[in-house]
């Protein structure tokens, strides 16, 4: 018989948030794959658990190499428990490769539901929660980061991001530039910890605040794109939206049709705005010569 892979959610801050089943699974595991074995020891100490299973490290640097070893243990009947530093495994953390390997081998995969920074930040943000999408970490390089943001500039669902504290100011400034400085957002810092803070406001203001320096674990929540009526959109905004779609890879004809449909205006109106903007750019170019 094959074993079982258990994905266990761990506290994102306060250890008292650990799910009740976590202690039992730690005791029952034949193998515990931990993103950081030192953090695992601190967690088991806090829970008063003395594990007997073999503990191995499983982090970004060795995930590819160690997955076959753990998959083999699962095929041999082992109960493998996967834990990361905080939250649910595989959500911007190691885990996906092992889950995929287990599924491919017909191994049972189950989970111990637990805390999630994504859902916690979304719930306390004060922004719409009926529809949302998780975008993980933004690219480190400025150009790639801007490109990624432009891909979702017209997304109407609430957006959730993780970000490192030393990159927070740049990320918020890029969001303010691409999404607009008045788009609402929330920066959730140190969730469930002693110095928990949720800073809410327009992206432009949040970027100014973050420029002074922010510490701790960060989750950013951003309101989705508004749904303005035709009267709310001028030619400049229509052109901007077409360009965002083009930069994301759409052909101009498709971009114009998409913007028109989203804004509730005739395609001809969007087309005329794009042509007028192009003619204006050509005029400025000739004047410069």
Image (cartoon, rainbow, N blue to C red):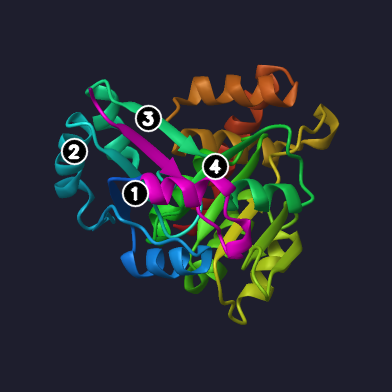
- Which residue lies at the image location 46% right of the left edge and 69% below the top edge? 45
Place of residue 46 in the rendered image (x, y in percent of width and height, measured from the top left):
52, 68
Residue drawn at 67 percent across, 73 percent down: 208
Location of mark 1 (residue): 94
In whole angstroms, how far apart are the C-alphas of marks 2 and 4?
A: 32 Å
Residue count near mark 4 (Cα–Cα under 10 Å), binned few <14, some 14–19, many ≥20: some
- In space, the residues marked 2 and 1 are separated at their CA atoms by 18 Å
The magenta stretch is 1-28
Q: Determine which residue is flagged by label 3.
A: 109
* Residue closest to the eye, 183 or 46: 46
Q: Nearer the viewer, residue 270 or 7?
A: 7
Q: CA distance from mark 1 to mark 3?
A: 15 Å
Mark 4 falls on what kind of element? strand
Count residues near mark 1 (Cα–Cα under 10 Å), then give few for <14, some for 14-19, many for 20+.
many
Q: Residue 196 colored magenta? A: no
Q: Tell me whether the residue at label 2 lies in contact with that at label 3, contact meaning CB atoms closer than 8 angstroms.
A: no
Who's the residue at 29% across and 31% down the image?
100
Q: Nearer the viewer, mark 1 or mark 4?
A: 1
Residue 73 image label: 2
User: Relative to residue 18, is residue 24 drawn left or right?
Assistant: left
**First in residue order: circle 1 vs circle 4:** 1
Q: Is residue 17 magenta?
A: yes
Q: Which mark is residue 79?
A: none
């Amino acid at each position: 018989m094959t074993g079982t892979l258990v994905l266990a959610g761990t506290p994102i801050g306060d250890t008292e948030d650990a799910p009740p089943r976590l202690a039992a699974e730690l005791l029952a595991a034949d193998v515990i794959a931990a993103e950081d074995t030192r953090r695992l020891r601190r967690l088991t100490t806090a829970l008063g658990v003395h594990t007997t299973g073999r503990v191995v490290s499983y982090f970004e640097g060795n995930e590819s190499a160690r997955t076959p070893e753990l998959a083999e243990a699962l095929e041999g009947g082992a109960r493998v428990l996967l834990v990361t530093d905080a939250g649910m495994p595989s959500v911007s953390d190691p885990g996906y490769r092992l889950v995929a390997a287990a599924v491919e081998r017909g191994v049972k995969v189950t989970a111990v539901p637990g805390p999630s920074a994504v859902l916690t930040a979304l719930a306390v943000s004060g922004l719409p929660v009926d529809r949302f999408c998780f975008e993980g970490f933004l690219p480190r390089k400025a150009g790639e980061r801007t490109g990624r943001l432009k891909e979702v500039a017209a997304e109407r669902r609430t957006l959730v991001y993780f970000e490192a504290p030393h990159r927070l100011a740049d990320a918020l400034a890029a969001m303010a530039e691409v999404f607009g400085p008045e788009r609402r957002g929330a920066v959730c810092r140190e969730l469930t910890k002693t110095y928990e803070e949720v800073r809410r406001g327009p992206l432009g203001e949040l970027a100014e605040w973050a420029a002074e320096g922010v510490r701790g674990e960060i989750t950013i929540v951003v309101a989705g794109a508004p749904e303005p009526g035709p009267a709310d959109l001028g030619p400049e905004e229509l052109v901007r939206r077409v360009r965002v779609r083009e930069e994301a890879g759409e052909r101009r004809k498709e971009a114009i049709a998409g913007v028109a449909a989203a804004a509730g205006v005739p395609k001809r109106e969007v087309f005329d705005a794009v042509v007028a903007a192009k003619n204006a750019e050509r005029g400025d170019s000739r004047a410069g010569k």
